[in-house]
Image (spheres, grey):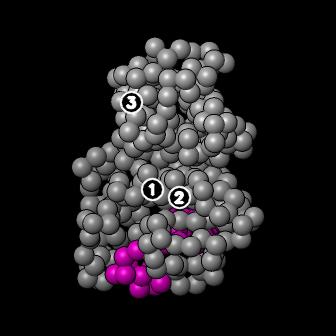
Amino acid sequence: MKLTSLSEVKRVIEENHFSIRKKYGQNFLVDENILRKIVDAAQLVADSSVLEIGPGFGTLTLALAEKARQVTTVEIDSWLIPILQNHFDGYGNIRLIHDDALKVNWSDFFESDEKVVVVANLPYYITSPLIEAMLIAPFRLQKMVILVQKEVGERLVAHPEQESYGSLSVYVQSASDVEWVCSVPRGVFYPTPKVDSAVISITPNKQKEDKILSPEILELTCRAIFGQRRKTLQNALLNSPHWKLTQEDLYLAMKELNFTTTIRGEKLYPEQIVDLANRIHLVTQSKT
């Protein structure tokens, strides 16, 4: 059974009377080369614990199970569960969970000190919330390798001055090392989606993470900057509907920074936005 074969995938669909459901963003990978690039990017070793989101027919799951100690895979579609159970028969290291990945209590399945590699083929509608959930999950995220729409991949790796640069870029890059693994043409999926995709690797960076004094203030700072991205930093921060920041607060926060409030916030690098958010946090906290 070669699930990267288009004819085999069509056979599975026909034999199981399976109906592809657009609401779950179901596009099945039928390319061995891309499959191997995803597995290689995960950098698995014999004792790796893997969490896979959205196994589809189990194509990637089986490849991961050949490399890892344990693969926990989460599928929301009840129609896929019996197909997956059949495909996973004989694999003692695959744990299948029928649930919504955004609602799972991960503490039920992973120890708090367990190192976990997350691998996922993410539909567009859950990409951002799933990334955020994994970065704060109650286990030790070792690496995340995700297959996403190309537009999202561009946002994840974007830098200042690039149109794709925004809150998601800063949120992920401020605490992680992000790498573009490869582009993925739409033709390697069945059915063929309307857009191309990309494989992105996200590796948490403890040194970066430790520099963030308040994730909440960093989020509000990003909202202010990118919600009004054409405004100067001063106008964006003082006129944000998400908080009440005074001119004095901003003056005190900017005193030790190496950029001015006349710059547009979208020109700042993630580490500069972290510095700014930290200063705002310290200034506002001193008033409470």
Q: Give the alpha-carbon distance from disc 3 to disc 1, as whole Å.
A: 26 Å
Residue 76 within the segment the image draws in magenta: yes
- Residue 92 sits in which quadrant? bottom right
Name the residue carrying label 3: 239
* SS for callout 3: loop
Q: Determine if the magenta segment contains residue 249.
A: no
Q: On the image, which quarter does residue 223 sit in? A: top left
The stretch in magenta equals: 59-87
Which of 45 and 8 lies nearest the eye of the viewer?
Answer: 45
Circle on res. 196 = none
Residue 274 visible to an observer of this rendering? no
The foreground one among 243 and 81 is: 243
- Residue located at (58% from left, 53% from top): 135
For badge 2, the amino acid type reads: Ala
Q: Are marks 3 and 1 in contact (CB under 8 Å)?
A: no
Measuring from the top left, give residue 155's x and y in whole percent: 42, 38
Query: Badge 2, how many Cα within 10 Å: few under 14, some, many 20+?
Result: some
**Dot 1 amino acid type:** Pro
* Alpha carbon separation for disc pair 3 and 2: 29 Å
Name the residue beneath numbered marker 1. Answer: 129
Residue 112 x, y percent position in the rendering? 72, 67
Q: Amino acid at mark 3?
A: Asn
Give the structural element (helix, strand or loop) at label 2. Answer: helix
**Can residue 41 be seen by looking at this rendering?**
yes
Q: Is residue 236 left or right of residue 71?
A: left
Q: Where 281 falls versus 98 (above or below)?
A: above
- Judging by the rendered image, the residue that carries numbered circle 2 is 133
Mark 3 or mark 1: whose residue is earlier in sequence: 1
Q: Residue at x 28, y 79 (%)?
A: 18
Cα distance in 3D space between marks 1 and 2: 6 Å
Query: Quadrant of the image for the N terminus?
Result: bottom left
Contact check, label 1 and label 2, Cβ < 8 Å: yes
